[in-house]
Image (spheres, helix red, strand yellow):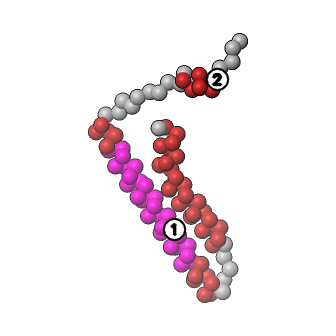
């Protein structure tokens, strides 16, 4: 049995063409753009709200688990920011 080189394996992978209608593609791009904008706005609002809660808790002398909450908000921001490039990398 002959061994295949990596370039020979990659050459056999089919590359299908997109058959989506242009009007549908434009509408989907608009919806995804709005969703990305809303996700970014929600991330900024989450960071601002968490920061305000941290300041209020510090003034009152209460200790709270705001750092964990801030970590979750920042993780969501990273997920929203990298969703588009990751999908483009995988499917392009």
Q: Quadrant of the N terminus?
A: top right
Is 83 one of the magenta-colored residues? no
The magenta stretch is: 27-53
Q: Residue at x 57, y 63 (%)?
A: 74
- Magenta region's main secondary structure? helix
Q: Which residue is mark 1?
A: 46
- The local crowd at label 2, few if under 14, some if 14 to 19, many if 20 or more residues have their Cα within 10 Å, is few
Position of residue 85 measured from the top left corner of the image (x, y, whole percent): 49, 48
Q: Which residue is mark 2?
A: 5
Q: Where residue 33 appears, x then y in whole percent?
A: 38, 52
Q: Residue at x 52, y 46 (%)?
A: 86
Q: Residue at x 53, y 70 (%)?
A: 47
Whether residue 87 sits left or right of residue 21 in the image: it is right
Q: Closer to the N terminus: mark 1 or mark 2?
A: 2
Label 1, label 2: how far apart the Cα atoms are:
50 Å
Picture quadrant where residue 11 is located: top right
């Amino acid at each position: 049995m002959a061994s295949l080189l990596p370039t020979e394996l990659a050459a056999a992978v089919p590359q299908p063409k997109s058959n989506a209608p242009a009007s549908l593609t434009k509408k989907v791009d608009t919806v995804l753009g709005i969703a990305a904008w809303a996700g970014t706005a929600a991330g900024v609002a989450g960071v601002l709200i968490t920061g305000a809660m941290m300041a209020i808790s510090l003034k009152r002398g209460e200790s709270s688990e705001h750092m964990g909450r801030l970590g979750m908000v920042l993780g969501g921001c990273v997920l929203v920011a990298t969703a588009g490039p990751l999908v483009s990398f995988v499917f392009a």
